[in-house]
Image (tube, rainbow, N blue to C red):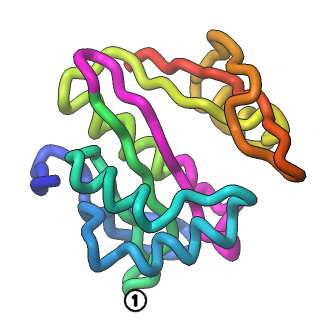
């Protein structure tokens, strides 16, 4: 993804100080996959991330001043809709407002590219994330049965949410 000077590249955080957004690249994937595997029961694979980058999806990382990867997001743009495919904060840095910063940046990225709506799916069991999305302004627009893989070869439903941009 080319750098876009209209989007914030650096933000201030009360705990972490200056944080930097940057386009996700192949060199980020080892750290991204480590976070993914630590925070999800059914994580994306390195190949999933590589395919997303190759497809030109909007993918950004968030790092502290020491270069530590704190989080990332991937958004697929289609016509006038942005689909938030993945958003993650490293386990040790959750509940510090970093998810909101990532949502801000993902939304700004989509608006800059003239998207009108952002969509996402969240596991029905992930009530904390669903609450964060609702507080951000997302509303539930539907459900997808058996959308996610779950324990013991079962499936779990997804809540589909939408945010006007």
Front position in the image: 96 or 70 = 70
Q: Is mark 1 on a helix, strand or loop?
A: loop
Q: Residue furthest top?
A: 141
**Left or right: 36 as drawn, with respect to 9:** right
Magenta residue check for 90: yes
Q: Is residue 127 visible?
A: no
Query: How many labels sit on residues?
Result: 1
> Badge 1 is on which residue?
66
Q: Which residue lies furthest to the front in this view?
A: 153
Vertical relation: 36 (above or below) 161: below
Q: Can residue 93 be seen in this view?
A: yes
Quadrant housing residue 81: top left
Q: Can you say which quadrant of the picture contains the C terminus?
A: top left
Residue 143: x %, y % from top left: 70, 16
Quadrant housing residue 142: top right
Front position in the image: 10 or 63 = 63
Vertical relation: 7 (above or below) 133: below
Front position in the image: 120 or 43 = 43
Front position in the image: 26 or 92 = 26
Residue at horizontal 80 percent and vertical 46 percent from the top: 150
Magenta residue check for 103: no
Q: Residue furthest right?
A: 152
Residue 89: x %, y % from top left: 58, 62
Residue at horizontal 68 percent and vertical 30 percent from the top: 147
Magenta span of residues: 78-100
Residue 73: x %, y % from top left: 43, 52
Residue at horizontal 60 percent and vertical 55 percent from the top: 97
Graded by Cα atoms within 10 Å as few (under 14), some (14 to 19) or many (20 or more), the crowding at tag 1 reads few
């Amino acid at each position: 993804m080319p750098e876009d000077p209209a989007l914030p590249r650096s933000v201030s955080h009360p705990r972490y100080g200056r944080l930097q957004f940057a386009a996700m690249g192949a060199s980020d994937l080892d750290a991204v996959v480590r976070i993914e595997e630590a925070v999800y029961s059914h994580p994306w694979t390195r190949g999933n991330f590589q395919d997303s980058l190759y497809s030109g999806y909007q993918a950004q990382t968030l790092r502290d001043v020491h270069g530590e990867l704190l989080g990332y997001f991937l958004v697929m743009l289609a016509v006038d809709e942005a689909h938030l495919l993945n958003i993650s904060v490293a386990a040790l840095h959750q509940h510090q407002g970093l998810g909101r910063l990532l949502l801000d940046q993902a939304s700004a990225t989509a608006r800059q590219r003239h998207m009108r709506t952002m969509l996402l799916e969240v596991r029905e069991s992930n009530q904390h994330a669903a609450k964060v999305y609702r507080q951000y302004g997302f509303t539930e627009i539907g459900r997808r049965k058996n959308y996610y893989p779950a324990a013991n070869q079962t499936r779990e439903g997804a809540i589909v949410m939408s945010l006007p941009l």
